[in-house]
Amino acid sequence: MRKVPVGPTTAGAGLTGDRVVAAGSAARTLVAVTARALRGDDCGDLGHPGPLSRFTGAPEPVRSAAAARAAGRAALSPGQVADVDAEGVAGWFVDQYPARRWPGAVLGSPHGAAAHLAVALGVPWLPAGFEVAAHWARGAVDRPDAALDHGAALAGRLLAGNARVHVRQVHCPASRGASAGATVSLAVRWRSLPTAYARFLAEGLEPGAPVLLLHDARTWPVRDEGSGHSFQVGCPASGLDPVDFHPDAHALRQVLRSAGGDGARWTPADVTSPAAFAENGVESGFEHDAREWGGRHGHPLHRVVVPQPDALSAATADLYRRWLRRAGKTGDRLVVECGRLLDPWQVLRAGLVPYWCENATRRRVQGVEWWLAGSEPFSSVDVLPEPPGVRSPALAGLPQWLAVAGFGRRRRALDRGSARGYPVTAVPTRRATEVLRNQPYDLPVPPPLRMAEALAALRDAGAHQGLLVS
């Protein structure tokens, strides 16, 4: 088994992939949980209570200030941003997987269901980009124009040493709270297949093994002047619409008040494209390069275009249910995961059907409610709501989460540890492992899915959800 290193070292800087990729970011978490599941491990070592745990009951201004300080301390300095090596980060991702021959691979946009799908297929999942958090010394959560100026300078430093990436800056106080005024969030997306990925696939894929590319097709207004750096205010994961980030929007005023900002100071930057792919989209050059590489090496590439996260979550849950039942299991026990609260190995070990909510916004929780309402009933429903650590008018309340659990016929469980202090607490990934370890064993694990079966199931289950499988 390959030993997982701390991370690649950037030449002359000693900067590791572990240090570069933002803690708690989606790509980082999903690679970690997928790699562990493929090794037969759970996620009991992922995440520990952070420094904000002692501020749970503190007044909002105190808690927001503590969150901003913690985010600033963890972020990269401007000098470190210049030392980021995107190719080294790709190497760090692939080095987390065991050295073996794989029957395929899943690449693309971060999505919890992609991790579950990869584990069912017995293949690795690799992201098409990663997130970097950079320090903003004199930042302000209510000044997106200042965030753009600062972020453009940081992006220029990063791009100077990484010509094959695009940097999408996201200023979103609705999803990041006070930390949006202490750090700049940079979504670094590869514009071609990283050399480390190509080498990993060439050495690890079985002959003719297919590659599946997942593409988050959500759009958002963007400012992009063609320099390799683009900027967006807000994001789809906020649960709000672009219009809600207008200075006169009531939702924006609520968000800024909670994050310690002032709506009167909000001056958004002009956009050049009203509908570009949002931060989790896949660069066209990455897809083109992956397809060309697969054609040269005999590995067909299939693409799944995801219009909303709920579509892939529902289709994957339906796929798991059919897969489990074909192996002689009931497929009647559901776990609803959220954000970083997931553990694919424990799901597999217990024979559970997983449904993943991107976050705790009302839209994502409504997605699982609609899916449950149209599905064959489950005998048990366990719900793991990840507290986002911020307040927002777009968030689901605990009663809505309890309504999800209420779909269980015999067992209806909402994790109390996740609900305690919701929505302003922070819960580590290992909380999901602690909860799921209490589920009864349902072994042996079903034989791995074949890619052809998975694609057929996604076409069948996802057609009415808007999934495009090609």
Image (cartoon, helix red, strand yellow):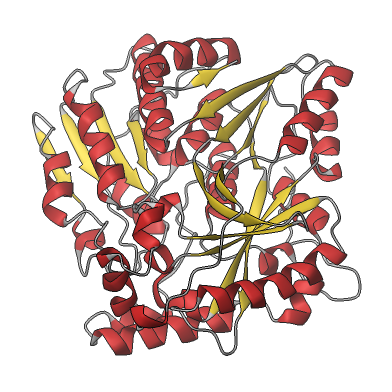
Q: At 58% from the left edge and 31% from the top edge, which residue is drawn?
A: 214
Place of residue 134 in the rendered image (x, y in percent of width and height, measured from the top left): 63, 74
| Front in this rendered view, residue 382 or 149 | 149
Q: Quadrant of the N terminus?
A: top right
Give residue 413's quadrant in the image: top left
Is 325 left, or right, of 149 in this rendering? left
Point out residue 326 in the picture as x, y percentages from the top left corner: 38, 9
Query: Residue 191 location, x and y as percent?
Result: 77, 44
Residue 127, picture quadrant: top right
User: Does residue 385 appear in this view?
Assistant: yes
Image-based side of 9 in relation to 210, left or right: right
| Near-viewer residue (134 or 141) | 141
Q: Position of residue 437 (x, y in %)?
A: 33, 46
Viewer-nearest residue: 114 or 396? 396
Out of 306 and 375, give the one closest to the viewer: 306
Which residue is pictured at 45% across the width and 82% down the height? 68
Residue drawn at x 67%, y 49% is: 129
Q: Is residue 267 above or below residue 403?
A: below
Residue 269 found in image quarter: bottom right
Q: Is residue 171 above or below residue 454?
A: below
Horizontal side of residue 130 vs 250, given as left or right: right
The relative height of residue 375 versus residue 59 in the rendered view (above or below) is above
Q: Which residue is at 58% across, 34% downward?
A: 215
Residue 448 shows up from this direction: no
Q: Image check: 339 left or right of 70?
A: left
Seen in the picture, residue 192 relative to 313 is either above or below; the reply is below
